[in-house]
Amino acid sequence: MTVSLQPIGDNTTRLWGMTNAERVRRIGVSQGFAPEGETVVLAHLDYAFDPVWTRHLKDKPGTVVTRDGRPVLAHVGRIEMEEAAALMLAGAPLPGLVVIEAEDEAGIFNEALRKRERPFVEPLVMTTVPAIERLSYKGAYKGVTDLLTKYLWPEWAFRLTQLAARWGLSPNNVTAIGTVLCVVATIAFWQGWFWTGLLTGLVFMVLDTVDGKLARCTITSSRLGDIWDHGIDLVHPPIWWWAWASGCAVYGRPLSDQTFWIVIGTMLFGYVAQRLIEGAFIVRFGMHIHVWRPFDSDFRLVTARRNPNMVILFASLVAGRPDWGIVAVAGWTAISLVVHLVRLFQAMAVKRRGAPVISWLA
């Protein structure tokens, strides 16, 4: 059965720099709705909604999502489309359809993320735009993250995402700027200009949040952008650590040859091994290791990824010992690797006992 997504009504209020009709069109394209379907999901343009709703309704014909009793989204047959659209525009109930109230505290279960969530549905007028953009931004991140992304720069990234949308910057534009800054930070670390590298790296790390958020909020994700962004994210951290270790000599705190290679070897092996463990967990259990149990989500805040490691390096630089910092990063990488390996084995043991391995967020 093919399904199309059809906006109804008119609304000139702009959200993330675009009209609601354009937003609905982009949602339809990104979620694979057909231009002309056998059934149709009608979207009332007087309301802005989380794209999760249309994905949820796509395979649920005969269902309507309401806000304060007024129909906002309805999956109906093409024959009933005109009558349903007229009733929706009049704010009248749609008889015979299963009703999902957007205000319901229970929310809906997201099958893709295997978690329960409560997507937003809000009236779209000029006065509600700031609140809706914040809700949209908040909903753009799915899952758990590190302590810097969660606590230090959410507001910075939100404001920059708004600014980028207003200026018409694409996510790839932001990624390109970030890529340049990433290279500059690498050179600075290699030259022992650690404060310059940290400042440049901080801006890059914030933009690394912004490009993904911008793509989701403006519904402009692309295959190129996804590969580019994730490719940079995957490759640059071990290069940064190598550059930092090399820069210690220029800074005046050189590592001995033996210590240097132990540090580099530990970090490279630990970095790759942790990624492989995370991949193995996804393949075996259908979810990310960091959403299994509360401990795993909490450990994601500090595990030896780029951002927590940068906190260690910053602290060491404040102490005037960048060499201690890179040694500490290597040690923390080894500890994090052991934790991930233990958690993988524990999950495997749970499954062998016949118990389900499911996310605590479900």
Image (tube, rainbow, N blue to C red):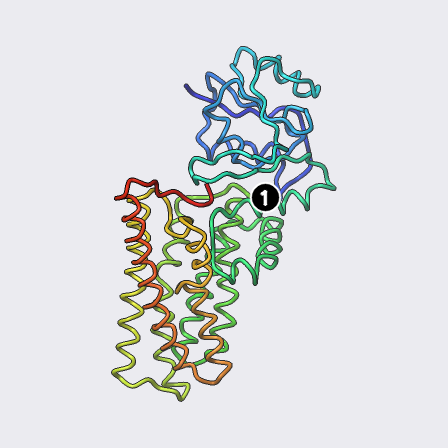
Q: Position of residue 58 (x, y in %)?
A: 48, 26
Image position of 304 (left or right of 148): left
Task: Using the image as rendered, state which of residue 101 and residue 73 is in the foreground.
Answer: 101
Q: Is residue 43 visible?
A: no
On screen, residue 347 above or below 91 = below
Residue density around tag 1, few if under 14, some if 14–19, many if 20 or more, within 10 Å: many
Q: Position of residue 190 (x, y in %)?
A: 38, 77
Relative image position of residue 349 (x, y in whole percent): 27, 49
* Residue 265 as seen in the image, left or right of residue 247: left
- Which residue is depicted at the point 26% across and 72% down? 265
Front residue of 61/79: it is 61
Q: Residue at x 30, y 75 (%)?
A: 263
* SS class, disc 1: helix
Return the residue found at the far right: 127
User: Which residue is label 1 attached to?
Assistant: 136
Camera-nearest residue between 306 and 98: 98
Residue 104 horizontal/vertical position (percent) = 61, 32
Residue shown at the point (44%, 45%) measured from the top left: 360
